[in-house]
Image (spheres, rainbow, N blue to C red):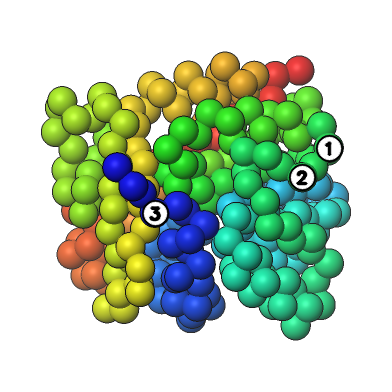
Amino acid sequence: MTTTSPASSYSLNADYWTRIIRGGLDRYRTGLTNPAMLAAAGDVTGQAVLDAGCGEGYLARLFAGRGASSVVGVDLCPELVDAARAQAVVEGLDIRYETADVAALPLDDASVDLVVANHVLNDLEDPAPAIVEFARVLRPGGRAVALLLHPCFYGSRGRPVDRDSYYQTRRIEQHFDVAGEVSPAPVVAWTRPLEDFATEFVSAGLALVGISEPHPSEQQRREDPWWDQNFSRPLFLLLTARKVL
């Protein structure tokens, strides 16, 4: 089967995705997953941070603004990397952006304290090489924080996952549909059982130290019915791992 590569699909969607992110239109991100990622990352003052699969660079910019000593953003899509570089210049932020594969990072061994991977592992048919790279570039005791589509509940077109398909690697091809705006090109995502992700992290020398499932608070649900209409089951999984000494 011929599949669309992540780089080519995101190139076609680069302008769309940059507009969505910078306009704050993705409510799942602004209301749930961004706060969860930042909370899991914690205080980054004085730390070297890698934003793996950085897209148009917004998380890297947030970490740079929160006192990280250095920030590197890596993405396979050159158009998104160009957008990230341009915005960093506008904001006067010293961030290094590189067009590169997260499975072949242009960083030295043991050179960063924190790796954040925001949805990128779902872009990969085989996430193992990327996870090995995360472990390679992390210093002993460094952490990796990875946000995923929830493998137990996220199926094709967001439908629930049945028992038999859950234990397989599943390919999902769909357009982004955010705030009523549909992406020009479809994207491909891959999901697999939670035990597979756990095995890959542990095999790479990363001990899982945290697991959470970002979801709307009771206050969010009371104040905005959008959440009950659009978050009927768990959609996201957040894994935190530490490099074994």
Look at the numbered disc 2 and give the secondary structure of its residue.
loop
**Is 204 situated left or right of 20 in this image?**
right
Estimate how packed mark 2 is, as few (under 14), some (14 to 19) or many (20 or more) residues with alpha carbons within 10 Å.
some
**N-terminal label among 1 and 3:** 3
The CA distance from mark 2 to mark 1 is 7 Å
Estimate how packed mark 1 is, as few (under 14), some (14 to 19) or many (20 or more) residues with alpha carbons within 10 Å.
few
Figure quadrant of the C terminus:
top right
In this figure, which residue is indicated by the disc labeled 1? 108
- Outermost residue on the front side: it is 2
Look at the numbered disc 1 and give the secondary structure of its residue.
loop
In this figure, which residue is indicated by the disc labeled 2? 106
The image position of residue 44, as x and y in percent, is 74, 50
> Can residue 63 be seen?
no
Residue drawn where x is 28% and y is 37% of the image:
170
Q: Quadrant of residue 79?
A: bottom right
**Is 175 situated left or right of 82 in this image?**
left
Q: Quadrant of residue 190?
A: top left
Residue drawn where x is 22% and y is 44% of the image:
155
Q: Nearer the viewer, residue 190 or 160?
A: 190
Q: Judge whether 60 appears above or below 243 on screen.
A: below
